[in-house]
Amino acid sequence: MTPPALLPSWHPGRTRDAVVAFLAAAEALPVEARVAAFDNDGTLWCEKPTYVQFDFFEDTLRRRAESNPALLERPELAAVLNLDMAAIGELGMERVALALVELFAGIEPEVFTAAARDFMARVRHRTLGVPAPGTRYQPMLELLDELRRRDFTIYLVSGGGTEFLRAVSADLYGVPPECVVGTQVRYELIRRPDGRPVLLRTGGVIGGANEGEAKVTNIQSQLGRRPILAAGNSAGDREMLEWALAGDRPGLALLLHHDDREREFAYESVSGTLKEQEPITSVADRLGWTVISMARDWSRVFPA
């Protein structure tokens, strides 16, 4: 049987050469050193015009507001339901996100997981019109497959909610939920009148958003293994990419640049929670990262 072509959706060139060279070098490393960390939104699937997890919360809010219009008295929730991005920007994404987390306070984690999977089974992208899984990036799926062939452990390290991504990570990327690191909701353990312990979501989070330095510290505290490959698309991924190159083994820092208006969107990626002093593409050029041009380096963007 003929082996599958290596990274078939990547155009020949410097970017593909850098990825292929890293894959070859990694084969000489002990398996325990083969660890890769990927941001999710804007790195593995489309994040425009809104994050998929934002769409999940907006869908829940819309249905809840039909029976409880008082929810819209909160400016954060009104801005979400009206898709008022200017108001969301003024309020701050972190404040809005916390208000949305409260929508699921008081439920068991299994109920949340079921709701997330139900949403993913029926949602379609706002402008592309395809099911949400169809907005995954085919070239990145190919890279994940090549890493698995080389016995890499793959982490998903997202600024979004841990539990939402854990609910879908295996189906979307073949990554088990225990390899997901994200912004963590706080849980409360209570006992029913019969003495049975029950775990419930609260409306709070542990620490802040999983962006910037938090991505590195949370990888270490929750997973305990340092990646030698890191991939991201915004300033929220900077420290994670730097960390992948700071060790004494061959490393690769991949930054996805969204410059393909025809097939996806063209924009400069920014963090939702961090202040930026320099465009992340300028940082990448200065620090010697491998920048993926969606327009030039990929022959296709989405799965067929």
Image (cartoon, rainbow, N blue to C red):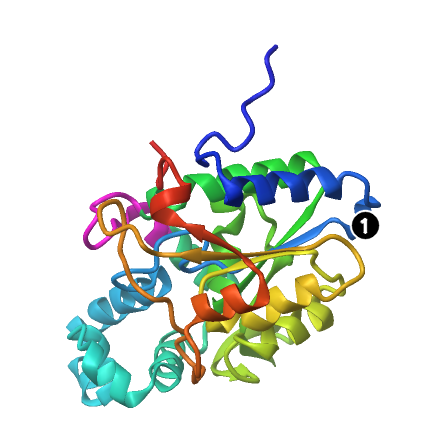
Number of callouts in the render?
Answer: 1
| Residue 133 in view | no
Stretch in magenta: 118-131
Which quarter of the image is occupied by the C terminus? top left
Question: Which residue is the extreme one toward the top?
Answer: 1
**Front residue of this view, candidates 120 and 266:** 266
Residue at image position (21%, 55%) is: 126
| Residue 243 in view | yes
**Front residue of this view, candidates 42 and 173:** 42
Above-or-below relation of 73 to 278: below
Could you tell me residue 57's position as x and y percent?
32, 68
Q: Is residue 52 left or right of residue 203?
A: left
Dividing the picture into quadrants, the one containing residue 221 is bottom right
Q: Residues within 10 Å of mark 1 (few under 14, many from 20)?
A: few
Q: Dominant secondary structure of the magenta stretch?
A: loop
Above-or-below relation of 10 to 101: above
Residue at image position (33%, 54%) is: 119
Could you tell me residue 176's position as x and y percent?
61, 50
Could you tell me residue 125's position as x and y percent?
25, 51
Residue matched to label 1? 32
Amino acid of disc 1: Glu
Could you tell me residue 23's position as x and y percent?
67, 40
Which quarter of the image is occupied by the N terminus? top right
